[in-house]
Every structure is written in structure tokens, then in C-alpha cells.
Amino acid sequence: MNNQLVIIGAGPAGLSAAIEAARYGVKVLVIDENDKPGGQLFLQTHKFFGSRHHMAGVRGFQIGENILKQTENYNVEFLLNTVVWGIYPDRRVAFAEEGKKKGFVFGENILIATGALEKAFNFKGWTKPGVMGAGAAQYMMHVNRVLPGKKVLMVGSGNVGLIVSYQLVQAGSEVVGVIDSLPKIGGYQVHAGKIRRLGVPIITSHSIVEAFGFPCVESAVIARVDDRGKIVPGSEMEVVCDLICLAVGLRPFNELCWATDLEMRYSKEFGGFVPIHNEELETTHEGVYLAGDVSGTEEASTAMEEGRLVGVVVAEKMKLIEKRRAGELKKEVYERLRSLRSGTFGEKRAREKEDIFRDFASRGTQCIF
Amino acid sequence: MYILNKLPNDGNDGILSLERIRRLPGYPDESSFEKGPVVVIECDEDIPCNPCEDICPSGAITVGEPITNLPRVDIRKCNGCCLCITICPGLCMFVVYKNFSDTESLIYIPWELSLLPEKGTVAEGCNRRGEQVCRVRVEKVIKAKKLQKTSIIAVSVPKKYFEIVRSISY
């Protein structure tokens, strides 16, 4: 089995790369550990921001359906229920299919598009049933069709916390409050406005201290935090809830990158360690590319653009499109990425990316597998 | 919920003040409200987003370049068709018909909860904080078929609340 492009992760980044590469005739194999491709897109019931090109105003799961349909039009091969556990220097990708065979596939080019993981936050009682990540709550609602809790305390007011709170209200839960230890709401005002109109309070400068209840969560104690992040004694307060959702950030799902010995760097803006890469998203190992949240947690629209970019880069490398045409296509993607990384929220990410590209350039020659 | 609502939150609770909203380029001036149903855009952040501009059939909404501009509205062109309400990912667009009757205004609100009120329902009108401010009557329900799955409900409110009521609870 020899593939021109092996993609690890069938989320928005991986699938966009697969479609773009296959469009020009690249032989693509996509590997994912889930039983269905699409990644987190199928958990997103809200409409996406962006421009027409990013299908703005269309809901995430519909974008997912749309790109899955496109993979059917091209010759994209899938290997599902399969975990990739290593990438060897001779470009063998080691995989284990659930309950079945283990093996290797060769990839002339490899794309790591493993996405991001939810961060956890520990406090007394955080191991009780009823404390879960916001993404887990989303998964229960939208995939398992189970209401994860009737009274919910959301910890974290970033976009994930705000959006999942809204979805919980839509699903019939009562969100007793969204708390954030910072003095400012982290996410978009419009997302905050949606839940505020429905009567959900957002309390800044507050953190969770402890979860009570046996065997499951029955209440939580929250308290005010001062500007140094310390709990203000005497401000503790008990809130009745049966679900505590943690929406305290995401980090790149980078374990495979470490195992592949890619050079990494810490990025506060991107939530953790990211592999150092250049503008074409190639890592310090030639032929190993990144796309999506693993190259720095952002959101699905940038992930899809990064995927498309890698698709073009690989097609060019395989001499399936002319250099000039590839140049044009890449320029279009860079333009759209620039627009997605604009504004108060996006500019910081744009600067961080530039920094990573500079870091890559300063490291000199790449390691050749 | 009510306990948490009483906590002080440093004036930073995710709500735009009316003074601020009135200064937005997507907010009609006082006289424009008199002419008929007009769009009200409560969008105050430089998010890269412009589907409202694309969907508006009469070219009343402009975002332009860069895409992080706030939407501007040309009230002369707006006929209150409500298409923008359904596309906005931020659900921050409303259509307000101030002079619906002598005493009442009509407010079109995006609605995404599964429980859709019926025409004629009397409900509590809520402000941007979710606080109940007055009685409202549901005059129209436009169900989402293909409308990006966002339904629209139109409620009549006492005229003095036309800038206040932005949600209902029932």
C-alpha cells in the first residue's frame, strides 16, 4: 500500500486537505479513530462566522455533511476506527484498527490533522460523575442524544463555554450560570448576548472551588477571585447543579507530533506545544505536514483553509498541478486565512503564526526522513 | 439562577448598553424608526463575518473591506424583509416596526429554542438581560424550513419598549 498522502484525522482540516489533494489526482488515504469522519463539525449546531467562502451562516454539522459529500465525489480512501500510534523515519505510518489488524501504510507525504483536546481544570471533587468537558456535554447532546444534566454550571466564558451553554438551553437544560475567573468575558459579545437574553447569568472574576454530592454532583461552591487569581475568603457560595461543564480552553492534540520527534515550541496563544512549521505548513521533518488545531488551536474555518493549503502543496510536489497554478491557489488561501485572522480576536493569532514561521526559518535545514 | 443573577459582575456581563447600541452603524436613527419595519443590528465587535451583507436582497447592509468592519445599514433601502435575522451567526439582528399600531410596536426576534410559541400566545417580553419587562403578544411565527433553521417570532409590545424587548419567556 503506497499512498501519496496519508492524512491522520478526518476532521475539517483533514477532510479539506483530502478533497483538495484528490481533486488534482493525489492518491489519498485518511485515517481516523472514530467510526465516522467529520470530527467535531458534527457537534456544532451553531452557524459559523466568516464570509460566503467559509459558508458563513451555515451550521457546523451542515458544513460537515457538505464536505463528506465532496469526499465521495473524489477518490478518497478511509480507514476508520483506526488509531495511528507512530510515524517512522521511512515514512511508515503505524496503525491499529480497533479489534482487528495492526499494520503500516507508507505515505510519500503525511499530514497530521489530529485537532485539539479539551483542557481540564482540577478542583476538589472534580472526579465526581457530573463534571465533564463542554465538548463531552456537546457529544452527549448531539451524538448520543442524552441530556447531560438538568441544572448546569458552566466554567469558562470563552466561545466554547458560551456556545455550549446556549446549546444546553436549547436542549432543555437550565444553565444556572457561566463563571469565568478573568474579569472579562472571553468569547464574542454576540454569543454572550444570546444566553443573557434567555436569562443565563455570566459572572466574571469567579472560580469554582469545590463540587459536592454523592455519588454524583449535587452542588458546586464558587467564589470570587481577586486580580491575582486568588480566592477571596468569605465570598464562597453554593450553587445547586447536577452538571459542571469545563470550558477552560483547548490544546493541540500533539502526542503524535512528539512521538514523531518533530521540533516543538510552546505557544500560549495556541494553547500548548505546537510543531514548528513554515507557511506551507511543513514541519521540521520534510514531507510531514500539519493542518488545523494541531498547528495551533483556532477554529474550523481556519482549519479547513489550512487543509486546502496542504492539499495544494502536496499536489504541486507530486507534479499534478503546475507551479504557477499552485502559486495562485496558495495565494488565495493565504488571503482568506489573513481575513479569518483579522480583528481583535484574530490578530493575536496572526502574529503568533508569523512568529512560528520565523522560528522555522531560523532553524535552517530540515531533517530529512 | 436567581442567586447568581444578583451577584455583582463589574458591569461586564455580556450586554451592550442602549447608549452604545444607539451609536452602532447598524442602528437606525430616531426618525428612521417612524417609516416602517427596519433592521436593527446589534453587532459591536470586529469579527470577520459578512453573511448579512450577502443575503440582503436590497443592498441595505454593507460590511465591505476589511471584513471586520461593523455592518452599516442604509435605512432607505431596508424593507424589513427579515432575511438577515435568519443568517446572522450572532443572532444579533432584529427588525423593529415601531408604529405597528397607535400603541404598539412589533419586534421580530430570531428564535432557536425547540419550543416554538404559537400565534396569539401572550408571553413575557424580556430585555437584553433576560429580565421580564412587559407583556407581549406573539403576532407572527415564521417557522424555519430552510431558513438556516432559525425561526422568527414577531411580538407586539407597548411602544415605549421598542428598543428594550429582545426576547420572550413563556
Image (cartoon, rainbow, N blue to C red):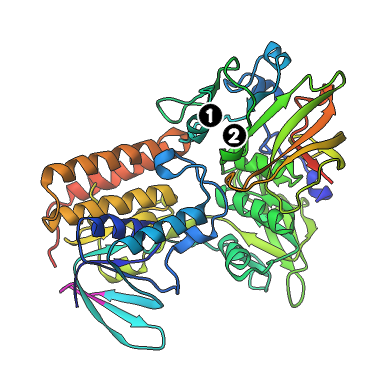
The chain carrying label 2 is B
Tag 2 or tag 1, which sits nearer the N-term?
Answer: 1
Q: Amino acid at mark 2?
A: Leu
Q: Position of residue B67 (x, y in %)?
A: 43, 30
Q: Which residues are magenta?
A: A87-93
Q: Position of residue B159 (x, y in %)?
A: 83, 22
Furthest residue toward top: B31
Q: Quadrant of residue A2?
A: bottom left
Q: What residue is rendered at 42% in x and 67% in y?
A: A37
B88 vs A315, left or right, is: right
Q: Position of residue B114 (x, y in %)?
A: 71, 54
**Distance of label 1 from label 2 (alpha carbons):** 7 Å
Q: Which residue is mark 1?
A: B56
* Quadrant where the N terminus of chain A is found in the figure: bottom left
Q: What residue is rendered at 14% in x and 68% in y?
A: A369
The chain carrying label 1 is B
Residue A229 showing in the rendered view = no
Is A43 located above or below residue B2 in the figure?
below
* Residues under numbered marks 1 and 2 in contact, where contact means CB atoms less than 8 Å apart: yes
Is A7 located above or below residue B97 in the figure?
below
Answer few, some or many: residues within 10 Å of disc 1's Cα (few below 14, many 20 plus, some between 14 and 19): some
Answer few, some or many: residues within 10 Å of disc 2's Cα (few below 14, many 20 plus, some between 14 and 19): some
Q: Amino acid at mark 1?
A: Cys
Which residue occupies the foreground of this view, B84 or A237?
B84
Residue A92 lies in the magenta stretch: yes
Q: Quadrant of residue A288?
A: bottom left
Which residue occupies the foreground of this view, B32 or A226?
B32
Q: Which residue is mark 2?
A: B83
Q: Label 2, secondary structure: give it.
A: helix
